[in-house]
């Protein structure tokens, strides 16, 4: 904090930029995916595989450009291709880069029972620590975006790390580095939000997309991956992006009221049984009285 | 003096300490298989229930091992229970005589057992326990299979996962309540019960006190004329 307070913002009578200005950056990082300028080249898919050390494997062809139906444990970045017919009959090919959204309020982390198998860094990145993962798959249930994927061989769950290993040493994520059109941006959440809103304004005012907007869903506290969409009112069009994602109600019920009710009942039960024994003591057998039975 | 299965003696009416077989070797072995598997299920399950109990996973070798064994132990417990069902479901049938006993539960809780109507091999409480565990295990099996292979469910069927996770935890809690009462009553409260599940026998006095109808049945005696 002491460093931040002495950071120079403006200098009187100084030629050029302010040295050191902007040095202390907001820690919350964000990836911005502008679906309106994505050309579906899949450079980000390749970059993701290369950086994370995975190789291509057999995939499913389903009459589209899409590499596979959904992300996989060893394929964290997938462009979803969706043909969309507009009201005027014209066709749009909607392309959305799908990956972990790095929720501010992550459902995977809420559902996970294993100590430190999922962590959230101060910069907003939600990261799986496979060394601590027990492979229960609860994160799969907790995620509103269908992102964590189970590896049957490792018996652990994997997903996009937002290139935490690159970000922590001052590099942008591999997908951002590879994007040729500049539809992918990386920076602070505030900066990306501002850039996204500017782009959405542009789309609304100059490009004939009155419903263009930014996807940063409040149901999960906002995300550290945000989208610019031509039609922000119908995110489902973009390969099933949920309109109002939130931690599933059953996961919330399980981790909140049920947990406390259950703990109370278990402790209360033990206390109650101990009380019963002290109050009423053991049940002892009684000797059979002489008239207690009769031979047939 | 003989301690055979159904002793008939004309010389004595009261032989309180004489033993009557109550549980066969198969019933006892099965009970302890179920008990052992349930104990491991309970500890591994509680490890996944709360971070404060995660250390319990150590009983089978840690988190990933607990995740691996919990479903298999569940199958063992279910198999043990279904065998019990096959052997005991007739004895566990809830009939008219249980209604009177149900009304006298407050007397039973206050250890005033002499006020209770005579019961057969199992009393109403034991029957409720049995059926509670039986139906719980069916629900735990169904939801457990979903959680076992949760990753194979397509995204469109995610509501099955949502239901399974809630059912599995809720029903497990019910079995924990039943389990606590069962262990308390049989191992602590009712003297002679625990030994009967180990050695297989109860004393005549025990049978006469707690399961009088059954006592008359197995000894071939009848209740005294009023």
Image (spheres, coloured by chain):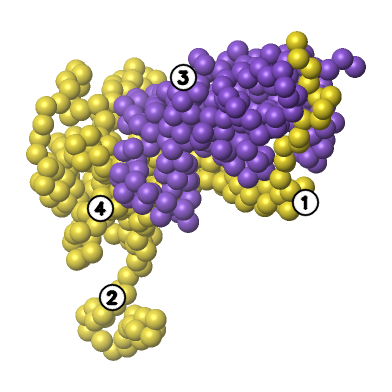
Chain colours: A yellow, B purple
CA gap between label 3 and label 2 equals 71 Å
Q: Are marks 2 and 4 in contact (CB under 8 Å)?
A: no
Residue A234 is situated, as x and y percent measured from the top left of the image, at: 43, 31
Which label number is shown at residue B173? none
Image position, residue B203 (x, y; %): 64, 32
- Give the residue at mark 3: B83
Mark 4 = which residue?
Answer: A131
Decide which of A257, A235 is in the foreground and name it: A257
> What is the chain identity of the residue bearing mark 3?
B
| Residue B29 visible | yes
Q: Position of residue A115 (x, y in %)?
A: 37, 55
Which is in the foreground here, disc 3 or disc 4?
3
Q: Nearer the viewer, mark 3 or mark 2?
A: 3
- Spot occupied by residue A259 in the image (x, y as percentages of width and height): 56, 46
Give me the disc on residue A23. Answer: 2
Q: Earlier in the sequence, mark 1 or mark 2?
A: 2
Kindly identify which residue carries mark 1.
A279
CA gap, disc 4 to disc 1?
A: 50 Å
- The image quadrant that residue B144 belongs to is top left
- Residue at left 50%, top 23%? B24
Spatial separation of the CA atoms under disc 2 and disc 4: 34 Å
Which residue is at 20% across, 41% downward?
A154
Q: Is residue B19 left or right of residue A111?
A: right
């Amino acid at each position: 904090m002491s460093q931040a307070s002495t950071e120079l913002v403006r200098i009187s009578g100084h030629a050029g930029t302010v040295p050191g200005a902007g040095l202390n950056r907001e820690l919350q990082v964000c990836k911005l995916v502008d679906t309106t300028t994505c050309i579906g080249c899949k450079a980000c898919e390749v970059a993701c595989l290369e950086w994370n050390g995975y190789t291509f494997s057999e995939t499913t062809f389903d009459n589209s450009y899409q590499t596979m139906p959904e992300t996989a444990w060893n394929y964290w970045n997938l462009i979803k291709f969706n043909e969309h017919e507009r009201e005027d009959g014209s066709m749009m090919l909607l392309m959305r880069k799908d990956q972990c959204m790095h929720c501010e309020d992550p459902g995977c982390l809420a559902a996970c029972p294993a100590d430190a198998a999922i962590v959230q860094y101060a910069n907003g990145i939600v990261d799986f620590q496979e060394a601590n993962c027990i492979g229960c798959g609860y994160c799969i249930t907790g995620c509103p975006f269908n992102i964590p994927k189970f590896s049957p061989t490792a018996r652990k769950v994997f997903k996009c790390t937002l290139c935490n290993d690159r970000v922590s040493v001052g590099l942008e994520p591999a997908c951002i580095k590879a994007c040729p059109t500049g539809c992918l941006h990386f920076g602070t959440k505030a900066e990306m939000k501002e850039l996204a809103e500017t782009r959405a304004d542009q789309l609304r005012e100059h490009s004939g997309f009155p419903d263009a907007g930014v996807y940063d869903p409040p149901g999960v506290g906002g995300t550290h991956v945000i989208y610019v969409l031509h039609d922000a009112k119908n995110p489902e069009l973009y390969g099933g992006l949920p309109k109002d994602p939130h931690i599933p109600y059953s996961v919330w019920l399980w981790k909140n009221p049920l947990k406390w009710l259950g703990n109370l009942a278990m402790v209360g039960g033990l206390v109650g049984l101990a009380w019963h024994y002290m109050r009423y003591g053991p049940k002892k057998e009684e000797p059979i009285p002489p008239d207690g039975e009769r031979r047939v | 003096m003989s301690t055979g299965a159904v002793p008939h003696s004309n010389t004595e009416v009261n032989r309180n300490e004489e033993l009557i077989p109550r549980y066969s070797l198969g019933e006892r072995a099965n009970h302890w298989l179920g008990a052992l598997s349930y104990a491991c299920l309970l500890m591994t399950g509680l490890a996944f229930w709360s971070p404060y109990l995660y250390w319990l996973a150590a009983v089978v070798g840690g988190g990933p091992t607990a995740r691996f064994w919990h479903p298999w132990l569940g199958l063992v417990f279910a198999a043990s229970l279904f065998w019990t069902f096959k052997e005991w479901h007739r004895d566990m049938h809830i009939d008219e005589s249980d209604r009177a006993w149900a009304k006298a539960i407050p007397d039973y809780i206050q250890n005033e057992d002499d006020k209770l109507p005579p019961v057969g091999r199992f009393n109403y409480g034991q029957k409720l326990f049995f059926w509670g565990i039986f139906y719980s295990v069916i629900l735990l099996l169904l939801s457990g299979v979903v959680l076992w292979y949760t990753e194979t469910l397509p995204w469109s069927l995610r509501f099955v996962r949502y239901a399974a996770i809630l059912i599995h935890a809720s029903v497990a809690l019910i079995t924990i309540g039943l389990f606590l009462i069962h262990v308390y009553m049989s191992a602590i409260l009712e003297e002679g019960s625990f030994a009967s599940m180990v050695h297989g026998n109860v004393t005549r006095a025990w049978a006469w006190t707690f399961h009088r109808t059954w006592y008359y049945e197995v000894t071939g005696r009848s209740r005294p004329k009023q």
